[in-house]
Amino acid sequence: MKLTATDEQLLSLLRENARASTAQIARRLKLSRTTVQSRIERLEREGVISGYTVRTDDSFERGHIRAHIMITVHPKQATTVTAALRAMPELRVLHSVSGSHDFIAIGVVPTVDGMDALTDRIGAMEGVERTTSSIILSTKFER
């Protein structure tokens, strides 16, 4: 499906706040409410919008430790490792990446000791060759 510039703007606004009313979005896009609603319905129907999620405010997890955890797996073990990582609620996202690592996960835990334990648990998994972590100091923006 080919997206228009308006569709891209609409998706950007929904990424900022998927709970914004159709009327609020329409005002920002300078479109009618019915036009915005029909565009959203079309994007959902075409599979461009596959769902909605919750993003917590940084203040909710203030003091929590967040880190990018780079994971290298043994050949042919990616499926098994992915399933095991999916079962870990401390991991918010798992990306398959190119380069020296196979995956990058984002982990969130309350303490430094918790992050140490999380990375140790990941490193001890069957099929994981090594991990490298980078603590996130701050998030400048997120869409």
Image (cartoon, rainbow, N blue to C red):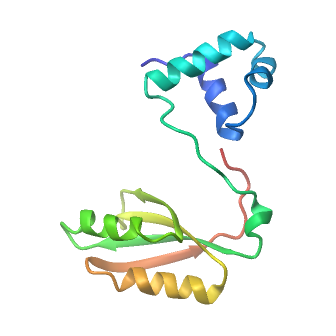
- Locate residue 100: give its quadrant: bottom left
Quadrant containing the N terminus in the rendered view = top left
Residue 44, image x and y in percent? 50, 26
Q: Quadrant of the C terminus?
A: top right
| In the image: residue 143, left or right of residue 69 | right
Q: Is residue 42 left or right of residue 66?
A: left
Which residue corresponds to the image point at 36% horizontal and 80% vertical from the top-left?
A: 130
12 versus 64 height, above or below: above
Q: With 45 as the anchor, is 27 left or right in this view?
A: right
For residue 17, above or below residue 78: above
| Residue 127 x %, y % | 26, 77
Q: Residue at x 52, y 76 (%)?
A: 133
Where residue 10 appears, as percent x and y from the top left, is 65, 25
Residue drawn at x 70%, y 40% is: 16
Q: Residue at x 43, y 22 (%)?
A: 46
Q: Is residue 77 above or below residue 120?
A: above
- Count the marks: 0
Picture quarter containing residue 137?
bottom right
Q: Residue furthest left?
A: 76
How far across and down, in percent of the image, does residue 112 sit?
64, 86
